[in-house]
Amino acid sequence: MRKFLIISLIFIISSCALTIKEIKNNPAKYNTKKVTISGNVIRFIDIPFTLIRIYELYDNTDTIFIVSSKSKNYQKNDKVNFEGKIYFLDKNSLSSILDLILKSISEFLLSNKLTSNDDKTLETSKIIFDMLIKFIGDNLGIIMIEE
């Protein structure tokens, strides 16, 4: 009987896992909420001159982009769990996030004397930014920032 209860409890817990589709179907409910998502890494991109890596995660229901530090170093097809906050991006919040990324890249380039010209730094930052936008494409509605 005890074994049956333990197996039942494990089944109930695992069947209640939050899916990416649930998050995307209820953005207002999950916006700024801390959640845990499990899935497989489809692809990732390292943001040059930063410690940021963006993963695209798939959980058999949908995909989501996760902004993370590079310290975990997950690879394509890895089964992973991420814990973090969900953010629904509108034009204002997206602009703020992109400004922070551009500022981070510019500060890195200048502090490491990889460029001495602010115009050149801005140009390099914009190229990196364009690369990021091409990677993410039209999926900029909802992201998760790992904590």
Image: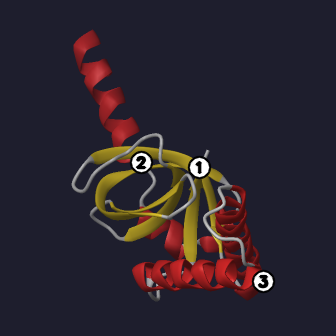
Please state the horizontal and vertical placement of residue 95, each as a whole percent of the image: 73, 82
CB atoms at circles 1 and 3 under 8 Å apart?
Answer: no
Few, some or many C-alpha atoms within 10 Å of disc 2 (few <14, some 14-19, many ≥20)? Answer: few
- Comparing 55 with 144, the one in front is 55
Q: Which mark is residue 84?
A: 1
**Residue flagged by tag 1: what amino acid is it?**
Gly
- Please name the residue that numbered disc 2 is placed on: 17
Few, some or many C-alpha atoms within 10 Å of disc 3 (few <14, some 14-19, many ≥20)? Answer: few
First in sequence, mark 2 or 1: give its number.
2
**Residue flagged by tag 2: what amino acid is it?**
Ala
SS of the residue under disc 1: strand
Q: Quadrant of residue 99?
A: bottom right
- Comparing 14 with 20, the one in front is 20
Where, quadrant-wise, is the C terminus in this rendering? top right
SS of the residue under disc 3: helix
What residue sits 49% from the left and 77% below the top?
Answer: 132
User: In this orientation, does residue 121 appear?
Assistant: yes
SS of the residue under disc 2: loop
First in sequence, mark 2 or 3: give its number.
2
First in sequence, mark 1 or 3: give its number.
1
**Residue flagged by tag 3: what amino acid is it?**
Asn
Please state the horizontal and vertical placement of residue 2, each as a whole percent of the image: 28, 10
- Comparing 34 with 47, the one in front is 47
- Please name the residue that numbered disc 3 is placed on: 92
Please state the horizontal and vertical placement of residue 41, each as a whole percent of the image: 30, 57
Q: Residue 40 vs residue 89: left or right?
A: left
Q: CA distance from mark 2 to mark 3?
A: 31 Å
What residue sits 58% from the left and 80% below the top?
Answer: 124
